[in-house]
């Protein structure tokens, strides 16, 4: 009887000891996640990116569970781009565990941007996949055009190798809806909004050269089809575009805008306009 009691007490002790060890491990992990000093590493990352012309401000970096790191807000801007900083929210980075044992480790990321969602993965060798969903776009077109583009980026998919250099290849597909241009009265139009409608784009990149195979839009005012290429430079001013466009007006197109088109190019017998968009992004020419 004494031996049986001793055995039961031993088993109970071992069970309790195991539970104590598990509890200690859980508490240790939680304490590690809550109090690990990530801030110095975030500041080092900001300094490294700054040397490459990327200005990043990381707010409240933190470790997360499952294992990973994240930040509630990150502000990103480029030194050579005249644009207000982009706000990235709820950024989360987690390692791709099966890749860590090889020479090409990777990680998964997710974030919120322009009220939409961005998710993807990237590897050390530059292989990257990104999916964008339901981003709300409200962007000025630039100092030369006092117009604002508003749209919903319903979906976009990027798959390829970064950066856009050398022999790196990439594919890009974009679907945009409810695209409209605001500020048309500044160009003499009777209506301030130009309803472009939906837009689809497919492109392939070979190094810095992006070949646009499909560019099409359909809306109440006009239909648009196009193709061409874009060459990326170190800055937007050094980047150039070469697009051939066919614009077919519809009845809803403002007569003032139709007259402006006629000043640029005479219509084809079917009423369409064959246009070309050429030059650096900072100084585009329409012919």
Image: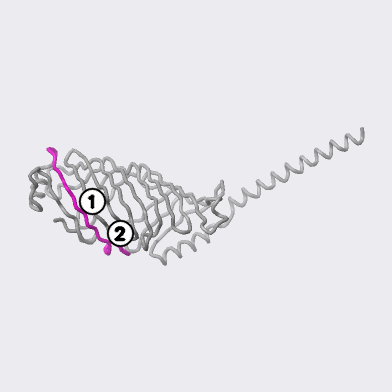
Q: Look at the picture and state if 64 lies above or below 234.
A: above
Q: Position of residue 26 (x, y in %)?
A: 65, 46
- Residue identifier under label 1: 227
Spot occupied by residue 64 in the image (x, y as percentages of width and height): 54, 48
Q: Which residue is mark 2?
A: 209
The residue at 72%/41% (across/down) is 19
Name the residue located 79 percent from the left edge and 42 percent from the top edge: 14
Quadrant of the drawing holding the N terminus: top right
| Residue 244 within the segment the image draws in magenta | yes
Q: How many numbered marks appear? A: 2
Identify the residue shown where x is 53% and y is 59%.
103
Residue drawn at (43%, 63%) of the image: 49
Residue 70 lies in magenta, yes or no?
A: no
- Which residue of the protein is positioned furthest toward the top in this rendering? 1
Task: Say what secondary structure mark 1 lies in.
Answer: strand
Q: Which residues are magenta?
A: 233-252
On the picture, is 247 further left or further right than 160?
Answer: left
Q: Residue 135 at what x, y percent from top left?
A: 35, 44
Direction from residue 126 to residue 265 in the image, left or right: left
Q: Position of residue 40 (x, y in %)?
A: 53, 61
Q: Is residue 207 above or below residue 29?
A: below
Q: Looking at the image, which is closer to me, 223 or 187?
A: 223
């Amino acid at each position: 009887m004494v031996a049986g009691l001793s055995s039961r007490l031993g088993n109970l002790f071992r069970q309790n000891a195991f539970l104590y060890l598990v509890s200690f491990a859980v508490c240790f992990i939680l304490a590690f996640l809550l109090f690990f000093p990530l801030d110095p590493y975030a500041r080092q990352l900001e300094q490294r990116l700054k040397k490459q012309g990327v200005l990043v401000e990381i707010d409240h970096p933190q470790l997360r569970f499952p294992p990973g790191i994240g930040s509630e807000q990150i502000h990103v801007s480029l030194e050579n781009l005249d644009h207000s900083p982009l706000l990235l929210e709820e950024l989360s980075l987690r390692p791709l565990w099966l890749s860590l044992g090889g020479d090409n480790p990777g990680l998964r990321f997710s974030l919120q941007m322009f009220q939409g969602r961005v998710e993807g993965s990237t590897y050390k060798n530059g292989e990257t996949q990104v999916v964008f969903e339901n981003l709300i776009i409200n962007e000025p077109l630039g100092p030369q055009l006092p117009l604002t583009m508003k749209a919903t980026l319903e979906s976009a998919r990027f798959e390829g190798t970064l950066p856009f250099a050398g022999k790196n290849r990439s594919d890009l597909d974009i679907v945009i809806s409810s695209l409209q241009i605001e500020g048309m009265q500044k160009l003499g139009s009777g209506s301030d909004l130009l309803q472009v409608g939906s837009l689809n784009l497919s492109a392939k990149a070979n190094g810095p050269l992006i070949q646009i195979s499909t560019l099409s839009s359909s809306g109440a005012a006009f239909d648009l089809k196009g193709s061409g290429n874009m060459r990326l430079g170190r800055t937007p001013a050094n980047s150039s575009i070469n697009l051939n466009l066919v614009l077919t007006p519809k009845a809803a197109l403002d007569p003032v805008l139709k007259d402006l088109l006629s000043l640029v190019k005479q219509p084809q017998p079917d009423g369409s306009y064959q246009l070309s968009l050429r030059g650096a992004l900072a100084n585009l020419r329409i012919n």
